[in-house]
Amino acid sequence: MNNLPTTLELLDSLLAFNTVSSEPNADLIMWVRDLLLDAGATVKLIANEDNSKANLFATIGPEDQRGFVLSGHTDVVPITGQHWSVPPFSMTLKDDKVYGRGSADMKGFVACALHAALKASPMNLKTPLHLALSYDEEIGCVGVRSMLDMLAMAAVRPLMCLVGEPTELNVAIGHKGKTACHVSCIGRAGHSALAPQALNAIHLASDLIQSVRQLQTQLAQSGYRDDDFEVPYTTLHVSNIKGGVALNIVPDLCRFDLEIRNLAEDDPLALLQIIRGDADRLVDVARQTVSEADITIELFNSYPGLNTEPTAELVSFVRSLRESGRLHKVAFGTEAGLFANELNVPSVVCGPGSMQQGHKPDEFITLEQLNRCDVMLENLMEHLVKGIVCDEM
């Protein structure tokens, strides 16, 4: 490919696309597709129902061999309510830092991966390189599922996967799983002056939330622990609570969202069953006076954790691509758990930048981190040319 764009030039273009999860990513994906097609890559798009969003899976090298996946998401979190000193959807280079929404999380890595793919296109790779770009990761690894379905049906599945979320190029071998639910509590409306004759749905929700908090306390005090995590136990979290119309009306409906972020040793569905049991007991008591009382719990999103063994061949291989670094586990979730659990593709998380900068105003990534990632991927290319990735693969 003539006039190969630099990583910084690619990042400049990527940051200009407003790909907040509520917005389409199609323009970005089509731009990437055209770059890769011009370089001779094989590109597959997996679009959503209205074609406003799409995943991209590209291959450089032989298509009948198992390849190495560089995986990243193209969506970013909103800027709503944040005060930026630089334009969020364009690149600002200042003091060896690149500012812009998604610079760290994770268009910086996407730019490095795209640069590596373009650079690899004229090489005679014996082991192929795959580039996997997904949508709607920030709302629960939603978009990548259709790409995984495609790969599950493919004649040749990937060999291994590196997810480039920002880890300051340390190799992360684990993250927690996530399970998210909508909870609806049904009471009976009434005049607040006659409150005992009604059933306050907010009170019913509060009782269930107290049960959730008690379960959280048990997990923190006597549950499984993994001290490799910043929070070393499974957590439960309640948010987005809504209920009531007016102060003088006893509310008959209260809704909230429930989240479980679990260690590999904890089964989130088993924990959810405990919460359902508490909800059933609360409803049984409430129905003694109000027949329509109810609590429903609807699971709307989940993804598995990642728990790659530190002795895995993939781990030592990825560590060999970098100058230095440490093994660790990250608090945030990624598609790595899905690649590992649904496709049985060994996976790790390793990318430039820090999540300390993610989701904040004036998000940035340093030039030093981008340069180090470029070196890591150049080292990867040398192995792919030789066709030797991991001895046991």
Image: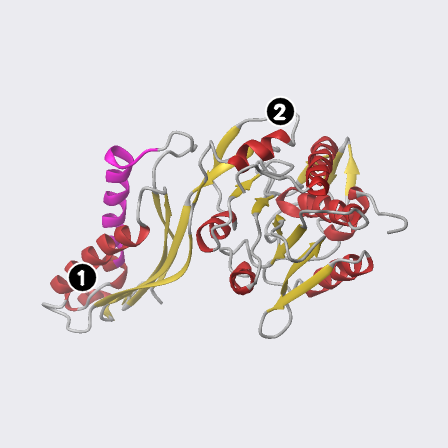
Q: Is residue 280 above or below residue 115?
A: below
Foreground mark, 2 or 1, reads: 2
Q: Is residue 376 above or below residue 246?
A: above
Query: What element does badge 2 sit on?
Result: loop
Query: What element does badge 1 sit on?
Result: helix
Q: Is residue 334 visible?
A: no
User: Which residue is denoted by mark 1 in the rendering?
Assistant: 280
| Residues at discs 2 and 1 in contact (Cβ within 8 Å) | no
Q: Residue furthest left?
A: 288
Q: Which mark is drawn over residue 103?
A: none
Mark 2 nearby-residue class (10 Å; few <14, some 14–19, many ≥20): few
Horizontal side of residue 34 vs 322, given as left or right: right
* Nearer to the camera, 372 or 59: 59
Q: Residue furthest right?
A: 2
Q: Is residue 23 visible?
A: yes
Q: Quadrant of residue 289?
A: bottom left
